[in-house]
Image: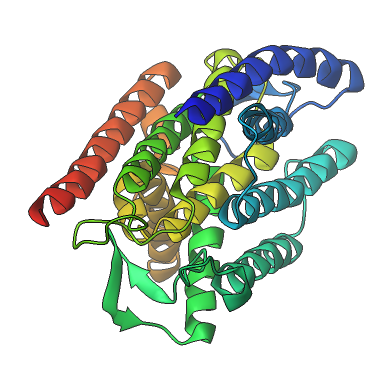
Amino acid sequence: MRAILLGGGISLLISLLGTRVAIHWFTQWGYGQEIRDDGPTSHHTKRGTPTMGGVVIILAAVIGYFAAKLITLTTPSASALLLLFLFVGMGLVGFLDDFIKISKQRSLGLRSKAKMAGQTLIALVFGWLALSTWLEDENGRSPASDKVSFLRELDWFVLPTVLALLFIWLLVAGFSNAVNLTDGLDGLAAGACVMVFGAYTLVNIWQNNQFCQEEPSASCYNVRDPLDLAIIAAAITGACFGFLWWNASPAKIFMGDTGSLALGSALAGFAILTRTELLLVVLGGLFVLETASVMMQVGFFKLTKGKRIFRMAPIHHHFEMLGWEQVTVVIRFWIITGLCVATGLGIFYAEWVSRL
């Protein structure tokens, strides 16, 4: 528990102070955000706001985790290192995207095929390592499982290795892009991520307290390294919290694709490594809603040859176009996230109680 508090606290301080430094230097270097021309006109005033703030989130979380391990004199686990690989790797893909936007002075960075190729490579390497037998612990637990899971592994839903890798890729690519779509209003994605990563901190703490290592039972959790995962979840929560101070409306800095791709992939990584893959759909309900709105809009537009369901997608822009203030949209979407997190944690706890 001490390591969890240390990881979260150190990353919070680094993010809170480091983001202020990043704002100064990114402004000096001209690392300003380009705004899409077809977006709400109210967003044009944000042109030139420093971006790539996700660099601070990633650094704060990674330093917070390793500082906690160093202070408590414990060794990083395979699960933790894999999750950090996914987190930092996707952040690098996002960094390239952001840097191209800045250097080319355009609202689009990496070409879609190049961006997806980078996401696919990171996701598949992560999946292959997580499923590999040579990363098993002394009890034969690998970091990830070839079984689909909701609150635990579903023993009747075993996937062949190729399909398991495909499923991992779908989760990682899907949620990294989902958080990217959500990151369209000041503080929206950062605030939502604070709640969902906070939920995974609690899930990992609970799984560690009910670990199958000592006394296996029907209610224990057969997850590798839950305590180490809790430290990372706390570190990312703290990093997002510190960043939110500067990212709340009116934002002084944006996380950019560097932050959104890293955070979305980390959410998928937690779901995979904690055997709660389908529960992420509930906990991250806001991100699912944002993605679904884009898919519905594009599909309906093509089917009806030009008609739209929403005034603009993702759905947070639809409410802006209806005349809602940006802050109102953000706060109400945070409330939706809070309800999703409360529902997901309630389901998680209720299932455990039902097994007693």
Q: Is residue 106 left or right of residue 306?
A: right
Q: Is residue 141 above or below residue 94?
A: below
The answer to whether any part of residue 101 appears in the image is: yes
Q: Position of residue 18 (x, y in %)?
A: 73, 17
Image coordinates for residue 207, horizontal then vertical, percent:
34, 48
Residue 307: give x, y in percent of width and height: 39, 57
Query: Quadrant of residue 114 in the image?
Result: bottom right
**Residue furthest to the front:** 214
- On screen, residue 155 above or below 326: below
Q: Is residue 343 left or right of residue 268?
A: left
Q: Residue at x 71, y 47 (%)?
A: 94
- In this view, the residue in front, 350 or 254, is 350
Give the color scheme: rainbow, by chain, secondary structure or one colour.
Answer: rainbow
Write the residue at 71% across / 28% down: 56
Report if residue 310 is visible in the image: no
* Rendered position, 335 above or below 129: above
* Residue under the point 62% across and 45% down: 262
Spot occupied by residue 122 in the image (x, y as percentages of width and height): 68, 63
Classify residue 102 by image quadrant.
Answer: top right
Foreground residue, 68 or 99?
68
Q: Nearer the viewer, residue 105 or 230?
A: 230
Residue located 89% across and 16% down the image? 28
Which quadrant is the N terminus positioned in? top left
